[in-house]
């Protein structure tokens, strides 16, 4: 349970500074802020593959809980802490971590499939 609170705290640390940038239309903080917050709680900061980044850009764009459009950046990182089955994706723009997006465990499984180029079809098709 403590780890869930740690993860929420890390998300808050990444989100609160964004309010200062709201007038500039950017939703980014120095990448060291969320990364250090996750690592301080023995969490993992995982650089995602270019394929996972592209996949998550589409998820982000269609997510009604994220701002309209595509996220900032040209890569992404996944923050995970023990005791939480999901994670938090940060889109990375240079030295900035931008637009954090919660990622449930089912989406993590799909991200693994994207990373390994595993193709599976649910249903019988046309």
Image (cartoon, rainbow, N blue to C red):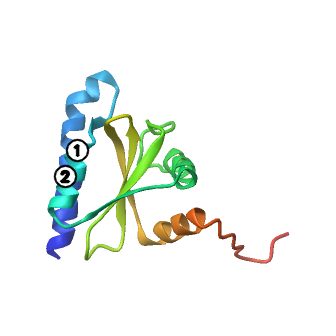
Q: Residue at x 65, y 70 (%)?
A: 118
Q: Secondary structure at mark 1?
A: helix
- Crowd around label 2: few <14 · some 14–19 · many ≥20 (10 Å): some
Q: Nearer the viewer, residue 126 or 30?
A: 30
Residue at numbered disc 2 = 36
- At which x and y percent is residue 47? 41, 54
- At which x and y percent is residue 21? 25, 28
Gap between marks 2 and 1 measured at Cα:
6 Å
- At which x and y percent is residue 50? 54, 50
- At which x and y percent is residue 19? 22, 34
Q: Secondary structure at mark 2?
A: helix
User: Do labels 2 and 1 touch, CB within 8 Å?
Assistant: yes
Q: Relative to 29, does residue 12 appear above or below in the rendering? A: below
Q: Nearer the viewer, residue 8 or 50?
A: 50
Q: Is residue 84 left or right of residue 118?
A: left
Residue 66 position by quadrant: top left
Residue 83 position by quadrant: bottom left
Q: Quadrant of the C terminus?
A: bottom right
Outermost residue to the right: 126
Outermost residue to the top: 24
Q: Nearer the viewer, residue 106 or 80?
A: 80
- Crowd around label 1: few <14 · some 14–19 · many ≥20 (10 Å): few
Q: Residue at x 72, y 73 (%)?
A: 121
Q: Is residue 40 left or right of residue 23?
A: left
Q: Relative to 73, does residue 103 appear above or below in the rendering? A: below
Q: Quadrant of the N terminus?
A: bottom left
Residue at numbered disc 1 = 32
Q: Relative to 87, does residue 26 appear above or below in the rendering? A: above
Q: Nearer the viewer, residue 60 or 28?
A: 28
């Amino acid at each position: 349970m403590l780890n869930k609170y740690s993860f929420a705290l890390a998300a808050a640390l990444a989100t609160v500074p964004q309010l200062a940038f709201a007038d500039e239309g950017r939703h980014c903080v120095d990448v060291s802020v969320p990364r250090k917050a996750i690592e301080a709680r023995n969490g993992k900061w995982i650089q995602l593959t270019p394929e996972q980044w592209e996949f998550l850009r589409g998820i982000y764009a269609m997510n009604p809980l994220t701002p309209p459009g595509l996220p900032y950046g040209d890569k992404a990182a996944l923050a995970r802490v023990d005791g939480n089955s999901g994670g938090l994706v940060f889109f990375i723009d240079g030295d900035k971590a931008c637009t954090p997006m919660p990622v449930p465990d089912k989406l993590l499984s799909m991200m693994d499939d994207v990373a390994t180029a595993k193709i599976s079809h649910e249903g019988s098709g046309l």
